[in-house]
Amino acid sequence: MRLAPTTLTDAELELQAEVRHYLDERLPPGHYPLGLGMNGARDPEFSRDLGARGWLGMSLPPEYDGGGRTAVERLIVVEELLARGAPIGHHWVADRQSGPNIAANGSELLKKELLPGIVRGELSFAIGMSEPEAGSDLAAVRTRAVRDGDTWRISGRKIWTTGGADATHILTLVRTSDDRHGGLTQFVVDRHSPGLTVTPIPFIDGTRDFCELQFDDVVLGDDRRLGEVGAGWSQNTGELALERGGVDRWMSLMPILVTWARTAGPDCATDLGGITARLWAFRGLSLSIARMVDEGASPSTEAALVKEMATRFEQDCLAVVLRHLGRTPRLDADDPYEALLARAVLTAPSWTIRGGTNEILRTVIMKGLNGR
Amino acid sequence: MSDTAPDPDLLALVEDFFGTESGTATIAAAETGEFPTALWRAADGIGLSRIGLPEERGGAGGGIGDAVAVLIGSGRHAVPLPLLETWTAGWALTSAGRPVDGEPTGFAATAALRIDDGRASGDLHAVPWGRNVSRLVALHQDRVLLLDVRGATVRERTDLAGMPADDLTVDGTPAETLEIAREDLLSRAMLGRAAQLAGAIDAAAALTREYTQQREQFGRPIGRFQAVAEHVVLLAEAAAMSLHVVERAAMSLAFREAAFEATAAKLVVAEQAGIAIAAAHQAHGAMGMTREYRLQHLTRRLMTWRADLGDAANLATRLSHTAVAASSLAHLITDPEPRLEPAP
């Protein structure tokens, strides 16, 4: 396994400078809700502003209003957003995951209908994958879609869907036959479809972004189907594989680390230096993976490896910052960074769970190692 | 900016040569204190001791990426030769306009010397291969010195890997100042050591994966147990990250002085070395604890090298000054040309 080093071109550095300049003005410190990486606050207006600048759906095809740009260019934009704890919640899933999935697997109709809205930052997606009996064992999905002429009728229950209540669309994986892997199909569901009930599941930090989706005979046209019948499993694993190596896997704490570094005293030196070196290393790894994707490779084992390491690193960083704080941070602190740190304490265990638990990732890595 | 990946033919040559020539018996023999002269001559004969140094000064040509590839290979095969030291000293010599020859040359990162009228007296502590070199490059305060150590009093010592790490005392030996920046030499030495560490981590990862596939307990290969497989994954991660940061720092050093990258790479690799030592031994059980088995040649080198040229606290402190001084930590780690702040 070689994660070749790469550097940014002059054009890429110009993009970085442009994004930095814009965000410095658009998000003055203290005037936006701070978020923990991909769990940033929802701000549809901010998402539309990013869309207007061409910074959403960057790698989507131009014929659907996408930017036709590279994975590296998207990484540059994303890392600037996450470094500030920007309010990316409205567009995050669509930009990272659903848009590329629809572009790769969707019908012409779906692509024309959905991709321009994703690019503009108007549409907000949530992922309906997990079920009470299907977490890491995703192939155990039971929610079923039954064909009825030109329509499908979906019934079942999805849980742990982040952003389900506020999304405009749900991209869901459901069973269309009993074949364990070959019997799964993806659909795009309008959030306000009759028969779809979305109920928040209060999260450990008291937020209400986590949801349960109840499908009671939700009727969908066959044109809502994403990809071939039975192709859902491979589409879904492909969708997961490459997003795993992204900068979001080690940047959750970045606003806190940036603040901490500014004020760190001599007693923090060893820890701060160690964290600096590892941040630099992970940034190189994520950039390497993005470059490989742009070169047409499919570095799924590498991406799993980076996520497995990076998410543990994030948790290590949190422990270090807490040790130097020397007390329990308050969720209702006046200092927004302390409040953010308190949310990090509560939600950090999820970092090694979401998007594939580290235990599952280690299995993916072992398979990758043995397959070579 | 282009990838400075080494020539594939060189990689194949390095792998083939060290794989054939640096066997367990050769390494064990070197531990008895006898310099492997034949191995050195063979390595020098194909240019491995002078790679990455300019041909017009006696080097074998090629870039820093090639030198790093040789050093990664030397770590992977636990090669009992002063390749890092000779390359580091050779870079100092050729950068200062001096020639290199085919002889082993020493490098001493710390020296407590008095310099009078071009002559040095004092102690050089734990000099790798000190007994085997006639001259060495030493860091002395903010200067880089070339010392003649033929007349040095040598107190023979060994490092944890059983390789020479001698205490030398010199008394009025000729000392010339090489007009190069101490920092630049240190960066190369750190990169070179990190490269050897990365190679040894990679080899420990491969050896452990192989072992856990073959060793059976409870009626199946132990690698099938998830608890054991976890060690194999940790090693693969350590190897992938270490090789990446070493190649990345080499790429930076090919174009400019890159003390930040060299320091960060060394720090990251040293930490991964600790993880790799623990995981490789745990997965091997008692087998890995014996001198008969190859793992110890790798892990004893990891144990020795990881604190070379600055231990974790020392390197991290330097990086922390840079982090505090940066406009933002996020900018620092995405900066295409980060600058290491001098220690205050």
Image (cartoon, coloured by chain):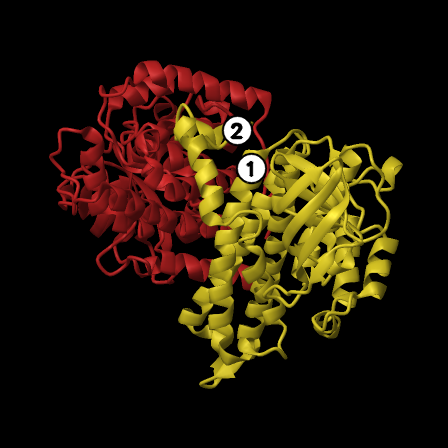
Chain colours: A red, B yellow
Q: What residue sits right under mark 2 in the picture?
A: B338
Q: Is residue A256 above or below residue A242?
A: above
- x%, y% of residue A140? 31, 61
Q: Residues within 10 Å of mark 2 (few under 14, many from 20)?
A: some
* Residue found 56% across the figure and 44% down from its top: B245
| Amino acid found under the numbered disc labelled 1 | Glu
Task: Evaluate whether label 2 is on the same chain as label 1.
Answer: yes
| Amino acid found under the numbered disc labelled 2 | Pro
* Residue found 72% across the figure and 51% down from its top: B170
Q: Is residue A350 left or right of residue B299?
A: left
Q: Residues within 10 Å of mark 1 (few under 14, many from 20)?
A: many
Can see residue B164?
yes
Q: What residue sits right under mark 1 in the picture?
A: B261
Could you tell me which chain the residue with mark 1 belongs to?
Answer: B
Q: Is residue B318 above or below residue B154?
A: above
Are circles 2 and 1 on residues that touch, CB within 8 Å?
Answer: yes
* Disc nearer the start of the sequence (2/1): 1
- x%, y% of residue B164? 68, 63
* Residue found 29% across the figure and 19% down from its top: A27
- x%, y% of residue B25? 74, 75
Question: Could you tell me which quadrant the C terminus of chain A lies in?
Answer: bottom right
- x%, y% of residue A157? 20, 52
**Relative to the observer, which residue lies in front, B312 or A85?**
B312
- Secondary structure under badge 2? loop
**Relative to the observer, which residue lies in front, B141 or B327?**
B141
Rounded to the nearest angstrom, the CA distance separating label 2 from label 1 is: 8 Å
Q: Is residue B104 left or right of residue A333?
A: right
Could you tell me which chain the residue with mark 2 belongs to?
Answer: B
Q: Is residue A76 left or right of residue B114?
A: left
- Secondary structure under badge 1? helix
